[in-house]
Image (cartoon, rainbow, N blue to C red):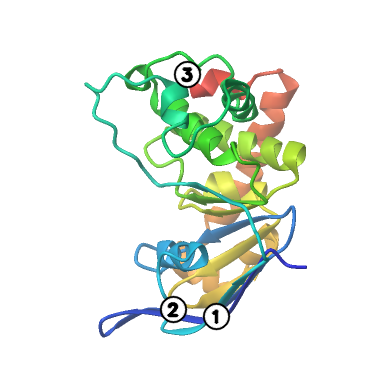
Amino acid sequence: MSLIHVDGLSVRYGSNTVLHHVNLTIEPGEIVTIVGPNGSGKTSLLRAIIGATAPSAGTVTRKPGLKIGYVPQKLHIDPTLPITVERFMRLTHPVPRQDCAAALEAAGVPDLLKRQMSQLSGGQFQRVLLAQALINRPEVLLLDEATQGLDQPGSAAFYRQIETVRRDTGCAILMISHELHVVMSASDRVVCLNGHVCCEGSPAVVASAPEYRALFGTGTGGALALYRHDHDHDHDHGSHSQDAAE
């Protein structure tokens, strides 16, 4: 059965309707990316899916007992607060050290367990958030612009790690991103959102759709080839995502 089924979802804040009649299904093991301009309702859709925002119409149905991992857009930690990565990962619930270590390895940063959170680079910090989301072995992983603030190599490395997570764990991934040049070819399916679903399908289909081009222009189609070139180039030279996470 589907992991998540969104049917006719509308979300309204006061008199402002941010989402109108959105349909979306997430199947086991697939990577789905939601793209759209600022204010298009992307985060509101994610919040409705996890139950943090109540629909004004429509329904969100989750598979019974569905385990969800969530990587937020940003998280601020007081830099003067002395807290190790291991302790941070145990803040929400106690977990064995070996589970923390395994989650960090899955996120591509196996050596950070004893590091102070304040000493992490931006890329490492996001990998720790990813590890925390993975610690309970979710069936679906939700990422809300998880690479915001990272440079392009760091973002590309992060999304390659997401592909590795999907390969190794089989979990589905639903992510929001504005980085079209990175995420498009990392996805099985792309949903273009602008208050409603403008178009959806494979990255190549969406990149050539008139609705998508009206929002993002025609230049982003070439970014697919650029990303594939970079992706292949990295693999040819045996580089590791850990390098870009530093």
Task: Tell me residue 229's x, y (percent).
Answer: 67, 36
Q: In the picture, residue 237 is in which quadrant?
A: top right
Q: CA distance from mark 2 to mark 3?
A: 40 Å
The numbered mark at residue 59 is 1
Tell me the tag on residue 55.
2
Q: Residues within 10 Å of mark 3 (few under 14, many from 20)?
A: few
Name the residue rendered at 34%, 40% in the picture.
75
| Residue 169 point in image, percent of width and height | 73, 40
The residue where tag 3 is placed is: 246
Q: Is residue 217 visible?
A: no
- Relative image position of residue 70 (x, y in whole percent): 51, 48
Question: Which one is in front, 126 or 136?
Answer: 136
Q: Are marks 1 and 2 in contact (CB under 8 Å)?
A: yes
Disc number at residue 20? none
Q: Residue at x 62, y 21 (%)?
A: 98
Say which label, 2 or 3, has the lower sequence index: 2
Where 64 sits versus 103, above or below?
below
Please name the residue shown 25% across and 23% down the image.
Answer: 81
> Which of pointers 2 and 3 indicates the residue nearer the eye?
2
Q: Which amino acid does the dot numbered 3 rest on?
A: Glu
